[in-house]
Image: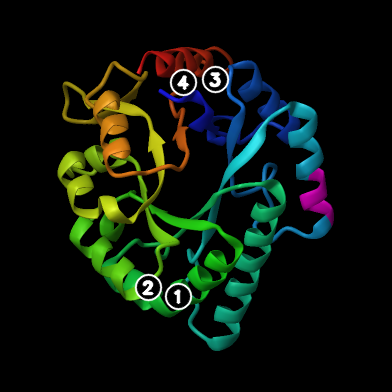
Amino acid sequence: MDLSRLSACSIPLRKRPLREALGIIRDAGFTKVDLLGGEPHFAPSPNDEQVAELQAAARESGVRIANLGTYYGRPLPSTKDEANAELEAARRGMDAAVKLGARSLRIHPGKDRSHETGFALVPFFRDVAREAEQRGLYLGIETHGGLSSDAPAMVELCTQVGSRHFGVLFDPCNCAQNGVDYKEAWSIFKDHVTHVHLKDGRMGPEGKWQRVHLGEGEIDGRWLLDELDRAGYDGDIAVEYEIGETEAPETGLKRWFEYCRTL
C-alpha cells in the first residue's frame, strides 16, 4: 500500500483536545488526518480564527488534514433562508478545507438518510458541488445505510447532481453491516467514489455485527486496494478506528498502521 495516501480518522479521539488527538495519530505513524466535523476538532461553520488555530495545530503536530468529516446537508432546509444558511456554512467549511490543504469533505443526505430526503436535497447538492469544483474539492456521502448504501440510487443521485466533484464516500464495512454486498455495490457506483474509509467487521454468533481489527473480519482490504487502482482512484484512504473499547487508540492505531504496510 502507498502509505502516502493513508490517513486516520479522528473519530476515536473525538473527546480529546485537538492537539492531543493529532499527536496520537502522528505517533501511530500517520502523516494525514481525517478530521471529524464537530467540536473540539472542527467547528461546523468555522471563522478565520478557528481555521488559523487548526492550521497551527496541524503544523505543530506534523500532520496534514486530508479530509473534513463535515455534515452539511444533515438539517434538511425547508425554506430559502435555511437553504442559504446551510450553503453559507458549507462555503465556510470548503474555504477551511482549501486553507488546510484537504482534498475532500463529507456531505450528508439528510438526517434520516431516506431516499425522499436525499433526492429533495439535489438543488442544495448542486450548489455545493459547483462551489466545491471551483475550489478543487470533492464531496462524498458516506455509505451509512438507507439511500447512501443503495448503489443504484446513489448513481441516480450523482447523475442528478451532475458533478464529478460529488459522489460516494465508500466504506465497505458500513455496507456489509447494513446487509449490502460491498463488492457488488462497488461495481455499481465505483465511477462516483470520491473518498474511501477502511475498517473491518464480521457477523457475531448472535447475528449482531461486530467491529474488529483490520484483517480479522470479512472485509478484503487487498481486494479494495486492487479495485481502487483498477478504477483509477487517486484520492486518500482513511482508516476509521471505531473499536476503542477493544483496544485504546494509542496502541490500536499503531497496529492498524502496521497492518496497512502489509497490504
Tell me: residue 11, above or below residue 259.
below
Q: Earlier in the sequence, mark 2 or mark 1?
A: 1
Question: Could you tell me which residue is drawn at 19 percent across and 53 percent down?
Answer: 188
Question: Which residue is under mark 3?
Answer: 249
| Marks 3 and 1, the one that precedes in the sequence | 1
Residue that label 2 marks = 161
The amino acid at mark 2 is Val
Q: Give the SS element for disc 3.
A: helix
The residues colored magenta run 49-53
Question: Which label number is shown at residue 126?
Answer: 1
Tell me which label, 2 or 3, sits earlier in the chain: 2
**Disc 4 designates what residue?**
245
* Residue 219 drawn above or below residue 164: above
Displayed quadrant of residue 183: top left
- The mark lying in front, picked from 3 and 4, is 3
Residue at (48%, 18%) from the top-left corner?
257
Do the residues under discs 2 and 1 have CB atoms within 8 angstroms? yes
Task: Give residue 21's position: percent from left, percent from top.
Answer: 67, 29
SS at badge 1: helix
Magenta-highlighted stretch: main secondary structure? helix
**Residue drawn where x is 30% and y is 35% of the image:** 173
